[in-house]
Image (spheres, rainbow, N blue to C red):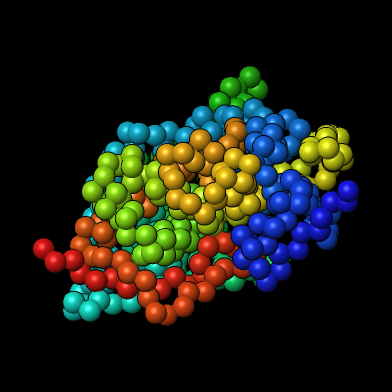
Amino acid sequence: MSVPIFDPTGLEPRSATDELRAESPLARTPDGTWVVLRHAEAVRVAEDAENFSSAVSRFLQVPNGRDGAEHAAMRTATDPFFGPTEMARLAPRLRRVAAVLVDELLDGVGPEGTEVDAVAALGAVFAVRAQTSWLGWPAALETELLDWMVANHEASRSGDLARTAAVAERFDAIIRSVLAPRRSAGAEAPEDPTTALLRLEVELPDPAVPGSARRPLREEEIVSILRNWTGGDLGSIALCAGVLLMGLSRAPELVERVRDGSEAEAGAIVDELPRIDDPFVANRRVATCPVTLAGRRIAAGERVMLHWTSINRDELVVPAPDAVDPEANATANLVYGTGPHVCPGRPLATLELVTLLRELLAVAEVRPSDTPGEREVAAVGGWAHAPVVLVPRRR
């Protein structure tokens, strides 16, 4: 049987893959990229970093766009930024950021409530403020970062590589504008994760120092890490906020569990709703040697796309993909990937989303809006516009 063609042009990721996945675990794009649609095959690829390389981007991507010893060393050096101690220290600050934003949105709102876009007005603004607070970046960058998020989304949807490159260079310039004064300040630089990266060393030899086993991060590596932490996270948190608020507005039975349940229960729901409607659409790999996957021969050098939106809806592991069941589906949930290149920022993303929801739901009910939402289309997932109504809770 021939491999089906995957062309998601103009489609949102679920409708582009649900029927195709029933036909085959693999598909191919018109340009020949293999597309992994099912769970078992995705786990096989994601956990086999030797045969499926993550070094696929024309841009430097640290750490998860590297392989082997370099990837392992970079993860060892940077994963502690998302460790339990750091997240516990950050949590009160994120609660303040969320509370201020919610107060702004509800200021002067009467009992009839107010309509907001959960992506643009809530998720995007919170993502920028949370990230700048965590990294110690100037609050004055908020407007510039929000504008960049819009430009980045438009570039991603266009598929225009020159446009994508220009947007990436624009973000790198923002990062360098933050790094420069810290380098000038030296020991007087503020103590925050951005400064910590400037001082970080990795267990990798320095070619300029014979016999060395450690070296500082290079400028381009620091820029890449911060681009990954911020540029990748800002849009993702905004899209997740849209998915979560649209879901909760239609599932009031979940609201109490998120608002009043344990952090673990809220986190499980925050994982489950994006599993159903995953805005983290895809990651890429390249085969390093000939390999067989799902009975198909993939040649060395061929590109492979892990389509997480489809993978997380695979009926072979989640029989009812649209049903909300955080406990039953937890072990199959690959919203943040799996294997050695699993997303390092998962603890931060979960903390941000749980904090935002709990601060919001403590003071407001979230109800569906009469205004229709607008879905994102490939290569982006989730909601482009997610209108919900916020109604102040009676005390």
Q: Residue at x 61, y 60 (%)?
A: 14
Q: Residue at x 76, y 33 (%)?
A: 51
Q: Residue at x 73, y 56 (%)?
A: 20
Q: Is residue 208 visible?
A: no
Which quarter of the figure has residue 193? top left
Q: Is residue 126 visible?
A: yes
- 162 or 243, nearer to the observer: 243
Count of numbered circles on the image: 0
Left or right? Give the position of 67 relative to 274.
Answer: right
Q: Residue at x 51, y 50 (%)?
A: 275
- 281 or 5, nearer to the observer: 5
Which quadrant is the C terminus positioned in?
bottom left
Left or right? Give the position of 109 relative to 223.
Answer: left
> How far from the left and from the top, in percent, is residue 118?
39, 68
> How far from the left and from the top, in percent, is residue 340?
59, 32
Residue 270 vertical position relative to residue 242 in the rendered view, above or below = above
Which quarter of the figure has residue 71? top right
